[in-house]
Amino acid sequence: MLSKRLEQAINEQIKNELYSGYLYLAMAAQCESMNLKGFAHWLKVQAKEELGHAMRLYDFVNDRGGRVVLEAIEKPPVEYPSLQAMFTTVLEHEQKVTVLINKLYEMAKEENDYPLQVHLQWFIEEQVEEEKNPTEILAMLKLTGEGGNGLLMLDSKLREREEE
């Protein structure tokens, strides 16, 4: 059985994961409007992945006899001045999520909730990839710039991302 404190904290993280998906979907929409289908595809795959993260937590709460309570999700920004600004936001957002997951893990340790600690191990490992990917995209954007053939090649490469 989950404590009420942990139940509330996981519900908050479910909201955060859903917001992440919403954020990436808004970014994908901007990329679509710029005819950058590869960037849009990458971001849509990321949005679906975030929904999957939320559902993992949702199922965990239910499996432990808790109650999922969905909170309102804030409207994400819908316009970025550049792709570098957009992917800087992705990286900063994922760094924030890493901090939130780590805090949730610390709470689970404080309460000796071993099942939650084990469950959160997957999220902790996942966040390494979640930070690595936008870091690599930002590095490529800095090398290619935001125009010309380099951008088109990067857009094509991002279109190759497979859904998990």
Image (cartoon, rainbow, N blue to C red):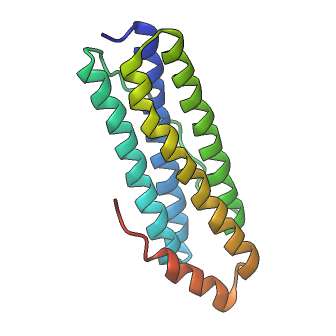
Quadrant (top left, top right, bottom left, bottom right) of the C terminus: bottom left
Question: Going 69% across and 84% down the picture, which residue do you hit?
Answer: 147
Quadrant (top left, top right, bottom left, bottom right) of the N terminus: top left
Front in this rendered view, residue 147 or 53: 53
Q: Percent x, y for residue 144?
A: 71, 81
Question: Going 70% across and 78% down the picture, which residue do you hit?
Answer: 146
| Residue 29 in sight from this viewpoint | yes
Q: How many marks?
A: 0
In the rendered structure, the answer to whether residue 113 lies left or right of residue 83 reads left
Q: Is residue 111 above or below residue 15?
A: above
Q: Is residue 48 above or below residue 121?
A: below
Front in this rendered view, residue 24 or 2: 2
Q: Percent x, y for residue 76?
A: 56, 46
Q: Quadrant of residue 132?
A: bottom right
Q: Is residue 17 above or below residue 38?
A: above
Residue furthest to the bottom in view is 149
| Residue 35 in sight from this viewpoint | no
Q: Quadrant of residue 79?
A: bottom right
Q: Percent x, y for residue 67?
A: 30, 17
Question: Going 51% across and 80% down the picture, which residue do you hit?
Answer: 157
Q: Percent x, y for residue 99?
A: 62, 33
